[in-house]
Amino acid sequence: MAVLPSTEEQVRHARDLLARPDNTVTSIAKLLGVSRNTIYNYVPELKGGRLALAEATSTPELPQPTRSED
Protein backbone atom coordinates (compact mmCIF):
# COMPACT_ATOMS: atom_id res chain seq x y z
CA MET A 1 0.00 0.00 0.00
CA ALA A 2 1.47 3.36 -1.00
CA VAL A 3 1.56 6.08 1.61
CA LEU A 4 0.24 9.41 0.47
CA PRO A 5 2.59 12.38 0.86
CA SER A 6 0.28 14.03 3.39
CA THR A 7 0.31 10.82 5.42
CA GLU A 8 4.12 10.71 5.30
CA GLU A 9 4.17 14.27 6.56
CA GLN A 10 1.76 13.38 9.38
CA VAL A 11 3.90 10.39 10.35
CA ARG A 12 6.98 12.61 10.43
CA HIS A 13 5.07 15.14 12.53
CA ALA A 14 3.87 12.43 14.91
CA ARG A 15 7.45 11.13 15.34
CA ASP A 16 8.67 14.66 16.09
CA LEU A 17 5.93 15.16 18.66
CA LEU A 18 6.56 11.74 20.23
CA ALA A 19 10.17 12.74 20.82
CA ARG A 20 8.90 15.16 23.47
CA PRO A 21 8.09 13.29 26.71
CA ASP A 22 5.21 15.62 27.63
CA ASN A 23 3.21 14.58 24.53
CA THR A 24 1.02 11.49 24.71
CA VAL A 25 -0.07 9.19 21.91
CA THR A 26 -3.66 10.22 22.68
CA SER A 27 -2.94 13.95 22.43
CA ILE A 28 -1.00 13.50 19.18
CA ALA A 29 -3.77 11.36 17.70
CA LYS A 30 -6.34 14.04 18.55
CA LEU A 31 -4.12 16.77 17.07
CA LEU A 32 -3.71 14.84 13.82
CA GLY A 33 -7.35 13.72 13.70
CA VAL A 34 -6.56 10.00 13.77
CA SER A 35 -7.00 7.17 16.26
CA ARG A 36 -4.36 5.97 18.71
CA ASN A 37 -4.27 2.69 16.78
CA THR A 38 -3.37 4.61 13.62
CA ILE A 39 -0.39 6.17 15.42
CA TYR A 40 0.76 2.72 16.57
CA ASN A 41 0.28 1.29 13.05
CA TYR A 42 2.31 4.00 11.34
CA VAL A 43 4.98 4.23 14.07
CA PRO A 44 5.47 0.51 14.85
CA GLU A 45 8.64 1.02 16.88
CA LEU A 46 6.46 2.88 19.41
CA LYS A 47 5.11 -0.51 20.50
CA GLY A 48 8.52 -1.07 22.11
CA GLY A 49 8.09 2.13 24.13
CA ARG A 50 9.48 5.61 23.75
CA LEU A 51 13.04 4.40 24.30
CA ALA A 52 12.72 2.11 21.26
CA LEU A 53 11.30 5.04 19.28
CA ALA A 54 14.17 7.30 20.35
CA GLU A 55 16.73 4.68 19.36
CA ALA A 56 15.05 4.07 16.01
CA THR A 57 14.87 7.76 15.11
CA SER A 58 18.14 9.02 16.55
CA THR A 59 21.09 9.77 14.38
CA PRO A 60 24.27 7.91 15.20
CA GLU A 61 26.83 9.86 17.12
CA LEU A 62 29.77 11.14 15.18
CA PRO A 63 33.11 9.67 16.19
CA GLN A 64 35.14 11.89 18.48
CA PRO A 65 38.42 13.15 17.09
CA THR A 66 41.47 11.49 18.55
CA ARG A 67 44.13 13.58 20.14
CA SER A 68 47.65 12.94 19.09
CA GLU A 69 50.24 12.75 21.81
CA ASP A 70 53.15 14.92 20.67
Image (cartoon, rainbow, N blue to C red):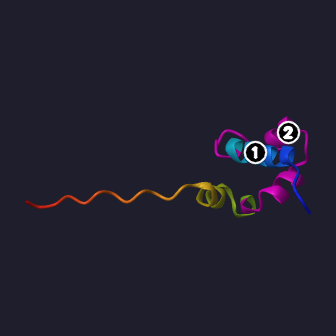
Q: Amino acid at mark 1?
A: Ala
SS class, disc 2: helix
Relative to 68, 70 lies left or right: left
Report x, y in % for residue 5.
84, 47
Q: Marks 1/2: CA distance?
A: 8 Å
Magenta span contains residue 54: no
Say which quarter of the image contains residue 42: bottom right
**What is the crowding at mark 2: few (fewer than 14 residues within 10 Å), some, or many (at least 20)?**
some
The residues colored magenta run 18-45
Q: Is residue 16 left or right of residue 32?
A: left
Q: Quadrant of the N terminus?
A: bottom right
> Which residue is under mark 1?
14
- Main SS of the magenta part reads helix
**Magenta-drawn stretch contains 26:** yes
Q: Label 2 amino acid? A: Leu
Rendered position, 48 above or below 26:
below
Pointer 1 and pointer 2: residues touching (CB < 8 Å)? yes
What residue did someone put label 2 on?
Answer: 32
Residue 40 picture location, percent across and down:
82, 57
- Residue at 67% x, 39% y: name it: 22
x and y percent of residue 33 in the render? 90, 39
Question: Which one is nearer the viewer's eye here, 7 or 48?
Answer: 7
Q: Is residue 59 left or right of residue 62?
A: right
Q: Quadrant of residue 9?
A: top right
